[in-house]
Image (cartoon, coloured by chain):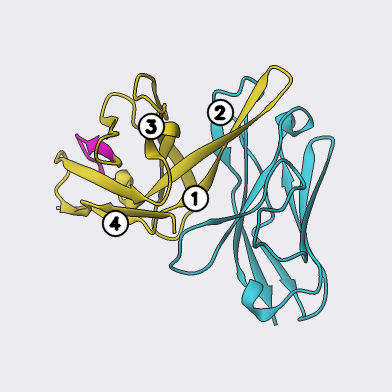
């Protein structure tokens, strides 16, 4: 089955830049999406189609994709950005809907 | 305001059944595909099942195929999932999610743009 691999954790100081990677064979052909999930809450879409930001999502969240890796960047991270982040995409056929393994972002 | 509100979770013995519901408001429910996504305690997200806007097409993850059945009632703006033959590994928070999509060329990209708060299913004797 198709897999998307993320680092388990990323730590950053307030005001610094956090980068979270997502690796998957089909990412060169398929869009990546990113979800933020704060403790005990539902996930929230923060990036769609590799690099687009939904309405209401702060500009410090940005996305990019190159080859088989997608990256979520939090520029000027804030304490309130602490959360688990999941990438999402599909396999090359589009039939398998898959989340990444998840990355816990700590801002301190 | 868009809302998705799940219910129906609880404690059930292995082999038991539950019916999960997701009542929606704030958007034209009948125009959108919907999905269920689950999250085991302390674990990541797993897409479980999806259904087209009319209910005519359904999709399942291999892990639940043959045991779970997704359905919807567009007159009640409600999504359902009948979960049968439950196993310990089905213990999770079950989220209802609204599907969205974009089209690039001939490729359709499906994703989840809004989520409910979830309902907890615990399978234990």
Which element is circle 3 on? Answer: loop
Q: Which residue is mark 2?
A: A1
Q: Report, in whole angstroms, how far the alpha carbon at label 1 lies from the one at label 3.
A: 24 Å
Chain A hue?
A: cyan
- Distance of mark 4 from mark 3, alpha carbons? 18 Å
Q: Which residue is mark 3?
A: B63
The stretch in magenta equals: B79-88
Q: Residue at x 71, y 40 (%)?
A: A49
- Judged left or right of residue B122, residue A52 is right
- Determine whether B67 is above or below A81 in the image: above
User: Upstream in the sequence, badge 1 or badge 3?
Assistant: 3
Q: Chain of mark 1?
A: B
* Residue B17 at least partly seen: yes
Q: Which residue is mark 4?
A: B120
Which of the pair A32/B29 is nearer the observer? B29
Q: Return the x and y of residue B13 as percentages of the image width and height.
A: 14, 48
Q: Secondary structure at mark 4?
A: strand
- Disc 2 residue crowd, few under 14, some 14–19, many 20+, Cα 10 Å: few
């Amino acid at each position: 089955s198709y897999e998307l691999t993320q680092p388990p954790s990323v730590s950053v100081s307030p005001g610094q830049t956090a980068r979270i990677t997502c690796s998957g064979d089909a990412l060169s052909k398929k869009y990546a999406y990113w979800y933020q999930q704060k403790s005990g809450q539902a996930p929230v879409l923060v990036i769609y189609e590799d690099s687009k930001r939904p309405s209401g999502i702060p500009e410090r969240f940005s996305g990019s994709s190159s080859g088989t890796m997608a990256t979520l960047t939090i520029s000027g991270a804030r304490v309130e950005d602490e959360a688990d982040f999941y990438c999402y995409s599909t396999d090359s056929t589009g039939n398998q809907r898959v989340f990444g393994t998840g990355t816990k972002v700590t801002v301190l | 305001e868009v809302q998705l509100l799940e219910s129906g979770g609880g404690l059930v013995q292995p082999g038991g059944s539950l019916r999960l519901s997701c009542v929606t408001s704030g958007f034209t429910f009948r125009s959108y595909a919907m999905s269920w996504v689950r999250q085991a305690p302390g674990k990541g997200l797993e897409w479980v099942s999806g259904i087209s806007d009319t209910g005519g097409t359904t999709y399942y993850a291999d892990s639940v195929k043959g045991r779970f059945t997704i359905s919807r009632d567009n007159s009640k703006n409600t999504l359902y999932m009948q979960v049968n033959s439950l196993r310990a590994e089905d213990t999770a928070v079950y989220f209802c999610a609204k599907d969205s999509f974009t089209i690039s060329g001939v490729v359709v990209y499906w994703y989840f743009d809004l989520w409910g708060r979830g309902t907890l299913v615990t399978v234990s004797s």
